[in-house]
Amino acid sequence: MAGLSLQHPLPFAFGMLGNLISFMVFLAPIPTFYRVYRKKSTEGFHSVPYVVALFSCMLWIYYAFVKTNSMLLITINSFGLFIETIYITIYLIYAPKKARIFCIQIFVLLDVVAFAAIVLLTQLVFKGSNRVTVLGWICVGFSISVFAAPLSVIRLVIRTKSVEFMPFFLSFFLTLSAIAWFGYGLFTKDIYVQLPNVLGFVFGIAQMLLYIIYKKKKNVVVEPTVPEHILKIAELITTPASELQVSIEENDRKKKANEDAEGVDNGKTAAAAAAEEGIEINAV
């Protein structure tokens, strides 16, 4: 098998390196999900990256079986399939109802419906080398869309001048992974593995350069100017009903107390005026 034995040392070496690095990348979210398990809450983070990663693993496993002689693609993506399934399961257990429903919808749409459609299309419509070609370009298109995802992170780093959302070592290992899998694709003459990893390498280098540029710069926080009446509305929206009721009753008491005080003051003023008038009458 090409790339699987020492008879082909270069593709084997690059494939094993790609497996090792990708293995570490797949394990990177473990601290996040351990925190989710410990706090029994997903803390508002999204499930989409894990559902997409699961779909990517399924797609590459299917491609490797159709192409044959690509066992190193099967091994790492099988592990990815296993670990991403665990991540999604943990997310579904601890996510709030709305996020759980959204995760299930995306999972069914992408990992069930879209994958089934691809399998049926390639099995029923295409045969032989044409099937490998069509499936390969599907894998390339999806992988490029996944590799383009860091564009949003790059834009955020440039806008905030902060590398808080772009860990250096994650960018570093993703770049190494792109190099390893490009080498594997190059020596196995698999253009569908080569192409997306060229883009992955470019984005990885860009992220590391941005990290070097902005790592010593302080965060620039832009405070939005919000009109006072909007702030008041926001306070009302976020205040519980019980607190609003207490606040309303307290305002009513204050208003009544002010009215009573004004009444007393008016009474005193009238009495003083009457007394003064009486004094003047007596004087006359």
Image (tube, rainbow, N blue to C red):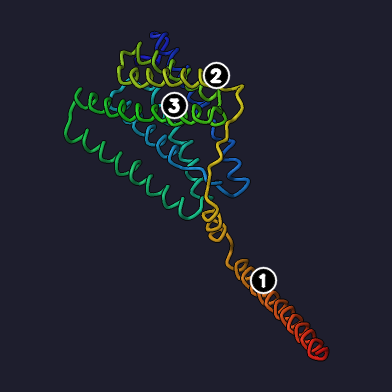
Task: State the image quarter where residue 197 is shown.
Answer: top left
Q: Which residue is mark 2?
A: 213
Q: Is residue 36 above or below residue 262?
A: above
Mark 1 or 3 closer to N-term?
3
- Amino acid on which disc 2 is placed: Ile
Q: Secondary structure at mark 2?
A: helix
Q: Which residue is mark 3?
A: 76
**Residue drawn at x 17%, y 30% as measured from the top left:** 126
How far separated are the C-alphas under marks 1 and 3?
65 Å
Quadrant of the drawing holding the N terminus: top left
Residues 1 and 83: in front is 83
Left or right position of 125 against 280: left
CB-based contact (under 8 Å), mark 2 and mark 1? no
Q: Which residue is mark 1?
A: 250
Residues 34 and 47: in front is 47
User: Label 1: how many residues lie within 10 Å, few (<14), some (14-19) or many (20+)?
Assistant: few
- Amino acid on which disc 1 is placed: Glu
Q: Is residue 209 above or below residue 256?
A: above
- Amino acid on which disc 3 is placed: Ile
How far separated are the C-alphas under marks 2 and 1?
55 Å
Left or right position of 17 against 125: right
Residues 28 and 211: in front is 211
Q: Secondary structure at mark 1?
A: helix
**Residue drawn at x 48%, y 49% as measured from the top left:** 92
How far separated are the C-alphas under marks 3 and 2?
34 Å
For residue 174, the mark is none
Mark 3 or 2 closer to N-term?
3
Q: Residue 16 placed where, x, y %?
A: 46, 17
